[in-house]
Amino acid sequence: QVQLVESGGGLVQAGGSLRLSCSASGSIFNINAMGWYRQAPGKQRELVAAIIGGGATNYADSVKGRFTISGDNAKNTVYLQMSSLKPEDTAVYYCHFRLGRFVKSDYWGQGTQVTVSS
C-alpha cells in the first residue's frame, strides 16, 4: 500500500507565499512522476506542476514563474513552493505519484486547502 500525506495549506493574502509538502510511504518503487493538481469549486481537477522521469518539470501556464516544484527521491517527498499567490489560486491541492515500471499505478493525497484572499 502507498500513502501520501500532504501538509502546508492554509489561508494567505494575495501576493503571499505558501509551501506544500507531500511525503509518500509504503511500497515506493519506480517513481515515474510526482506532482500537484488542484481543483477549485465547480471546476475540473487540473495539473499544477509535475516532475517527470529523469527530472524534467512541467507547469501549468497559469503558475509559470510563480510556483516551483522540487522533489527529494531519497525521502519520497515532493514540494510545491507557491509565490505571488492570487485569489484564483484558491483550490484544494492534491499530491500525485505515478509508480511502476511496466504497470503504472496512480496514487493521490487527501488534498489540502489553499485559500488566497484579495
Image: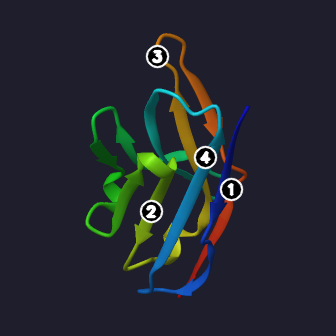
Residue 2 x %, y %:
69, 36
Would you name the residue on which mark 1 appears? 111
Residue 81 lies, with reference to residue 42, above or below; the image says below
Residue identifier under label 3 = 101
Distance Cα–Cα, label 2 vs label 3? 25 Å
The reply to whether callout 2 and callout 1 are in contact (CB within 8 Å) is: no
Tell whether 32 sits left or right of 108: left
53 left or right, relative to 12: left
How busy is the neighbourhood of tag 4: few (under 14 within 10 Å), some, or many (20 plus)?
many
Report the Cα–Cα distance between label 3 and label 1: 26 Å
Which residue corresponds to the image point at 68% horizontal and 56% vertical from the top-left?
A: 111
Type of amino acid at the residue the image marks with label 1: Gly
Q: Residue at x 65, y 44 (%)?
A: 25
The residue where tag 2 is placed is 80
Measuring from the top left, give residue 7's x and y in whole percent. Answer: 63, 66
Residue at numbered disc 4: 24
Query: The residue under label 3 is which amino acid type?
Result: Arg
